[in-house]
Image (cartoon, rainbow, N blue to C red):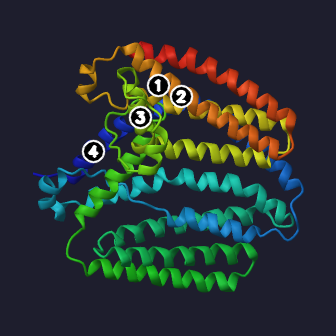
Amino acid sequence: MFDAGEFFKHRFSAHLKETSRYLKYIFNGHIAVAMLFFISALAFYYQRWLAELPENFPTALIIGILFAAVATYSPVRTMLQEADLVFILPAEHKMGIYFRNTLIYSFVIQLYLVLLAAAMLGPLYFATFANRQGSMYLLLLLVLLIFKAWNLLANWWMLRIRDKNIRTAEQCVRFLLNFAVFYFAVDGFMELASIATILFISLCLWDWRTSKQQFGLNWNLLVEKDIHRMQTFYRIANMFTDVPHLKTKVKKRQWLTSLVSKNIPLRRKATFDYLYRITFVRSGDYFGMYVRLIIIGGLLIWYVPNMWMKIIFAILFLYMSIFQMMSLYQHHRTIVWLDIYPVEKNVRQQSLLKWLMQLAMLQVILFAVLLAVLGVYTACAVVFVGGSVFSYIFVQGYIKRKITAVN
């Protein structure tokens, strides 16, 4: 006899085992240490910025947008798998306890978003409304928790809807109502916040009524969304360790592929020069990750006032970029054809090291040019020389030892 409660315990235990397996690499990795420094530096400059906060700063608008985003983003982690479409689908009428437990689990694991938003926006709230008591902010957080729960239920009800356009429109309207509630509440317009709350509850009731009119759960959508979330988690974990379950998407990017590969000679020793370059451009998220790190690092260099902090951030993001691109070496580990290439392993290693060095030098040049534009010529020189030396030592030292140990 099928027991939905026992099935949830089994699936939940397997899910925790799988995620904890990779979480230990994430929180023990080098990137975690770098991110800790990054967050500490941001917190320091955040406090300095709050001390000079303009009187007309749109605090209510910012808190309204971020709190609405946290409340609206309430995905349901069902932990369903593709095989469930065959083996569990016939027992849908017995799955009530299972889905109730997944809703509770989904709410609990998303509380970190509420805590992060509260910690980040709390100083801004008290700096703007210094005359308000702390209990007002606590009440606002309580409202956020309640709306978070309602949004989670609304998301669950809307997962029964087959029409994607209806789901998207409903989510947009729900975000606007969430925003209206928090914006008016922060700004002190309680009457308008109450009207927005009534409209929000009406929308949730419409979601519930509409879901009851549907015939059965949309199992394909439930499985698709849960697989997508796990793949997102695997992509994050892949920054710190190899993840065999990660499914990568290949993108054409023909112009970029031709740009990075047009000068590669047709020689045996250049085999992996070509492979690693087109893998970087087309496979996984290497190119996107590299560009995002350059943009974020460039923004920090632009806005951070202290010269030495600009230098530290430049080296920090250079380190993060090189470290994460190191996984290129293992990207094709499941393709046996590479093992029969008539190319020595040291040639393969040197191809990767050369490509990582070229990516690192491109990033060094971009950061140095940005510092020159800002007129910080001393920092420009330090980043160019120090970044070049750091890249060479890190690539030829740490990364070379790591990829050699793989063989």
Front one among 68 and 320: 320
Coordinates of residue 302 in the picture (x, y in percent): 77, 48
Residue type at mark 4 is Arg
Comparing labels 3 and 1, the label whose residue is closer to the camera:
1
SS class of the residue under badge 2?
Answer: helix
Q: Earlier in the sequence, mark 2 or mark 4?
A: 4
SS class of the residue under badge 3?
Answer: helix
Q: Which residue is mark 2?
A: 356
Residue type at mark 1 is Leu
The structure residue drawn at horizontal position 57% and vertical position 45%, both measured from the top left corner, is 291
CA distance for labels 3 and 1? 31 Å
Q: Are marks 1 and 4 in contact (CB under 8 Å)?
A: no
Comparing labels 3 and 4, the label whose residue is closer to the camera:
3
Residue 29 lies left or right of residue 4; in this view the side is right
CA distance for labels 3 and 2? 30 Å
The crowd level at tag 1 (other Cα within 10 Å; few <14, some 14-19, many 20+) is many
Q: Which residue is mark 3?
A: 20
Q: Earlier in the sequence, mark 3 or mark 4?
A: 4
Comparing labels 3 and 2, the label whose residue is closer to the camera:
2
Q: Are marks 2 and 1 in contact (CB under 8 Å)?
A: yes
Asked whether residue 87 is in view, the answer is: yes
Asked whether residue 32 is in view, the answer is: no
Front one among 198 and 330: 330
Q: Which residue is mark 4?
A: 11
Residue 107 lies left or right of residue 307; in this view the side is left
Residue type at mark 2 is Leu
Comparing labels 2 and 4, the label whose residue is closer to the camera:
2
CA distance for labels 2 and 1? 6 Å
CA distance for labels 3 and 4? 14 Å
The structure residue drawn at horizontal position 26% and vertical position 30%, both measured from the top left corner, is 335
Q: Say which quadrant the C terminus sits in.
A: top left
